[in-house]
Image (cartoon, rainbow, N blue to C red):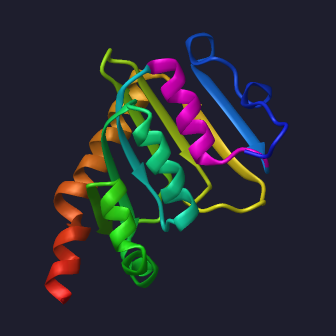
Amino acid sequence: MKRNTDIESILRPLDSNPFQAYLSNVVQVADVLEWILEQVGKSEIWQTSFSISEEFIRRLYFIEKSGNVSRFNLVLDHKATTKTFKLWSFITQVIQHTYLADNHSKILLVKSEAGDTVSVVTSQNLTRGNRAESAFVSTDYEIFTTLHKQVTDLITYHSVPLHDLFHSTT
């Protein structure tokens, strides 16, 4: 997020706003994740993206270090494999469950230990840019359940664990 910008000027608290959307060049998906975790507490996370950058992995490192992440599941696209392999060592130190699939989606799913669910569908890859990005944020359980089922299917039946793929090529 750009300095001097408060996420509360873009998004409202989850408990009073079950459906929200934004178009902004100041909010990053990592900002949204931190904002969600501040409200729902320790959670399991599923994140899909076409690609990821070193800067975003660094943000995830600090988010995980906060103690609010019980497990992080990441799905990236096969076509970004060259970049992903360059970051492999860093990714596996931060995110133990990373998968490669034919994926262009940008979805963030959060399920707290208390049972709260949050779904975010965004235009942003897990990279940093100063472009306008959009997102839809929902606490609707049916939306979460539908997306979670589809992401789980992608992971289970249509992906390769990054760890396995890397070791098969060395």
Q: Judge whether residue 38 is colored magenta.
A: yes
Q: Nearer the viewer, residue 5 or 61?
A: 61
Confirm whether residue 102 shows in the render. Answer: no
**Residue 154 place in picture, x, y as percent:** 27, 57
What residue is drawn where x is 37% and y is 63%?
91
Q: Magenta stretch?
A: 26-40
Confirm whether residue 158 shows in the render. Answer: yes
Identify whether 12 is placed above or below 88. Answer: above
Identify whether 122 is placed above or below 101. Answer: above
User: Which quadrant of the view contains residue 69?
Assistant: top left
Q: Is residue 105 left or right of residue 161?
A: right
Q: Nearer the viewer, residue 71 or 111?
A: 71
Identify whether 46 is placed above or below 49. Answer: above
Q: Is residue 120 left or right of residue 98?
A: right
What residue is drawn where x is 19% and y is 88%?
169
What residue is drawn where x is 36% and y is 76%?
78
What residue is drawn where x is 47% and y is 40%?
63
Q: Judge whether residue 165 is colored magenta.
A: no
**Residue 170 place in picture, x, y as percent:** 18, 89
The secondary structure making up most of the magenta span is helix
**Residue 32 place in picture, x, y as percent:** 60, 37
